[in-house]
Image (tube, coloured by chain):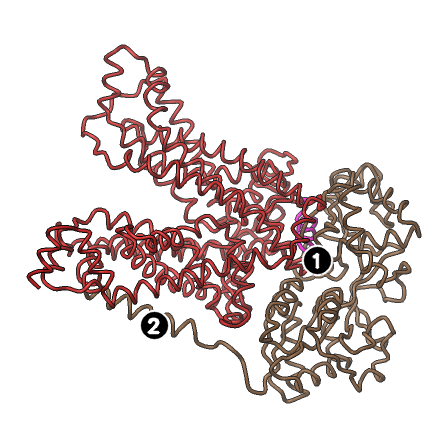
Chain colours: A red, B brown
Amino acid sequence: MAEGSWEVTQSRGQAVALRVGDPGLLAAFVAVGALLLGFVLYPTLRVISYPALVDYLAVPHNARWIAAMRNSLMMMLLSTGSATVVGFLYAYATTREDLPGRRVFQTLSLLPLFSPAFMVAFAYILMFGRQGLITKTLLGLDVNIFGWHGLWLVQTVAFFPYAALIIGQVLEAINPTLEHAARGLGADEWTLFRTVTVPLARPGLAAAMLLVAISVLADFGNAVVIAGNLPLLATEAWYRIEGLADLTGAAVVVSLLLLPTAGLFILERVWVSRRLYTAITGRGSRLVRPATPWYFRWPLVAFCTVVAVLILLVYAAVLAGAFARTWGYNWTLTLDHWRLALVQAGGQLVNSVKVGVASALLTSIVALVAAFLTSRRRYRVERALDVLAVLPAAMPGVFIGIGFLLAFNQPPLVLGGTAWILILALTFWHIPFGYQAATAGLKQIDRSIEEAAADLGASGLRVLTDVYLPLLRGAFAASFVTAFIRAVTNLSIVVFLVTPRNLVATYSILSMISGGFWGAAAALTTALLGVTFLAVASARLAISRGLRGLPVG
Amino acid sequence: MRWISAVIACTVLVTLVVGGGAGAQGGKVVVYSALDTPVTNAVLQAFEQTSGLRTEALTLAAAGTLATRIRVEKARPQADIFLGGSIDFHAPLANDGLLDAYISPRLAEAKLAREFYNAGGYWYGWYIGALAIMYNRDRFEREMAPRGIKPPATWDDLLNPAFKGQVVLPNPVTTGGGFIFVAAQIFRFGNEDRAFEWLKQLAANATLIPASPAAITLVSRGEALLGVNWGHDIRAMAVNQGFPVELVFPPDTATEIGGVSIIKGGPNPEGARRFVDFMLGRLPQDINAKFGLRYPTRTDAPAPLGMPALTTLKFVNYNRQWAIDNMQRLRERWQKEVGK
């Protein structure tokens, strides 16, 4: 192999060429490609092609669907605007090192990311509805929270953390010397904010807005609980099936929903992603940020406090709801709801965890192998694989749900009636998250390790298993945790694919909410949250243990 | 490498745990039930005792979802029986060739009225739901009684301006019950245009809800003052959960017929037929009246406890075929003229 090793050290292109001819790698390539084609592209095509052309042409005559499109776009603008503004201010505040309580604020803002899809809406009905603890019991007001305004509030609270996280990363990366320089040139705090901070945060702002916009458009859980009669694309598909058994109509509606989300997603890919990279990779100097003047600091603290209270209210409402006998009427403490929830739905909690673990494991494995295979992106096939691996991020959950319903209840592959249809739908919907984590992880690994292994005669697959996999533990764990949380808290896919034999907790909670069993719904939500936190905590523990054994590279 | 082995081992383990117990075969009758769990369990238990057959229930109180599932499972049906849910869900499945025809020998004995079964034997009605007006007693006594306003007794009472914004209606575009309500008004007025004039006035007073059970929850919880929904579901909320919700069956009300049907190509066709025979007997209807508070279709079975006898209710002359034939058109008209 003297000749081979010479080639490797000579040119990386040659090394890749060698690997493509590698039978093991080729098999992996074919396998991942087939999985993505079968579970991403095939269901997509099934949905779009299910209605006849006349069904699509009839859309302009359906007043409710036109209204749904208009409302979905309106909610997208409203909630994206507010969530981004709140997220930006929150991130701006919590990245100031001298802000009192910033760690607490930072941690609190992560809480909504753990909550089931409908939880904020449910909690705010308990707090701010006509029977709301705050609106009625404390303030004696008569408030109708159902409708666009309630949804706006709920989506702002539910989705601002995404914005805060992304913008926070960008703000952290801004070199404090720039602020010192601006100060030195005599800029006051407001000028500094306007001319330095905001312009530098712009790529983060754009990325945050796009991510929030996609989430708002696809938001099923909050909308189904609090939107009232407001037609929205994400919920209309469900009403078509639930109320009218109209699968064709549902397929039309989710196809309509795919247009704006895919559009936004493409925008994000071509326009923002690239810029954001350069912003994050730069290493900030360890210079301390200049002190925040009091007239900036205290309003920021006040703002963060208000937002934090709004988040805590969500958790307080659900927790209290689980113990109050009849919310709004009888505040006696009781454990009856827990009994009902755990007796009726204890098994479903276990199912949720099983489905979550199975799909998160599959997501992480497939995503990692896919990331390894596409990490060079030299050939067209690799780029095609890359596109397939990120495509699901552009699809709303309801779209995936209907896609799997249509695709896997008939030959060649019948999964209907088993838990697998739900597990695989969640698996492939979350591939982009695992794929991104793995890709980022791969970028940090020096190529020379791989070349050394190849030099020593390791095959392509051997390089993956012996070199990359051990080094990518962190990325694997990160994608597992994300995929697990999203799987156990999901509702938009679950409502279409849950099988009566394999009910999961989120579905039962939705039926409890609509059936009037609010106490049991609150108890089961609390239990689900507990399970989620427990799982995340143990995964974090496993990671920190694992990292200790990691050779410093 | 150890962690990779661990991951693989975990995956295999989870696969085994989750994948187990799919597909039910061998003598069992598999039932897709759109009723609530207590009623489903009691009915199936009674069937098992009388027939000696085993059953497997897939209970999801969502008839539309189950009908959709039957539709998409056409290539390989997973169940034998579609139990419960309005025949408005069963009939289209029959039209599309997804159900099996079966003329039960017990039909004569059951003495069902003509409207309660399909002449071709595709579905049988075994319970009846009637539309009712519901109101929150606590709120009514507190907010309306002092002003001398009486609880509503007729459909027209819903137009009272004092109720503005406090009435919840299931949306006729997204729910079956909401549509039956609209059709009932057309039959009441005997004139579609006049019915729509009335509906427009009502809609101005009302909040619409796109999913039916949620409307009952809202009134029970006092989020809304009054509304329209299925009598048995309202009564169940009061009886089973103790909410202060009252119901009134107004004159000129309308019904839904709850069905049972055999899914074509299911794993156990013989068991399915025996199940339908069983459903035409009194036992399941009595069980449903007791636990689900739904009216039986057999005339020899008594009304649910605490509910007026079916014969005392005043029904509008409801033409079910006309309603189904005109459903699409009426829904479009509603959207155009009422705009909700």
Mark 2 lies on residue: B13
Q: Is residue B20 left or right of residue A50?
A: left
How many neighbours does mark 2 have within 10 angstroms: few (below 14), some (14-19), or many (20 or more)? few
Q: In the rendered structure, are the residues bearing label 2 and label 1 in contact, judged by CB atoms less than 8 Å apart?
A: no
Q: Which residues are magenta?
A: B212-224
A396 lies above or below A206? below
Label 2 to label 1: alpha-carbon separation = 46 Å
Q: Which secondary structure class fits the magenta region best?
A: helix
In the depicted view, which residue is nearer to us: A81 or B257? Answer: A81
Q: Quadrant of the N terminus of chain A?
A: bottom left
User: Where in the figure is residue B97, as x and y percent of width and height?
Assistant: 71, 73
> Is residue A369 shown in magenta?
no
Pointer 1 indicates a residue of which chain?
A: B
Q: Secondary structure at mark 1?
A: helix
In the depicted view, which residue is nearer to us: B47 or A174? Answer: A174
Pointer 2 indicates a residue of which chain?
A: B
The answer to whether tags 2 and 1 share a subunit is yes
At x 62% / y 38%, what residue is drawn? A70
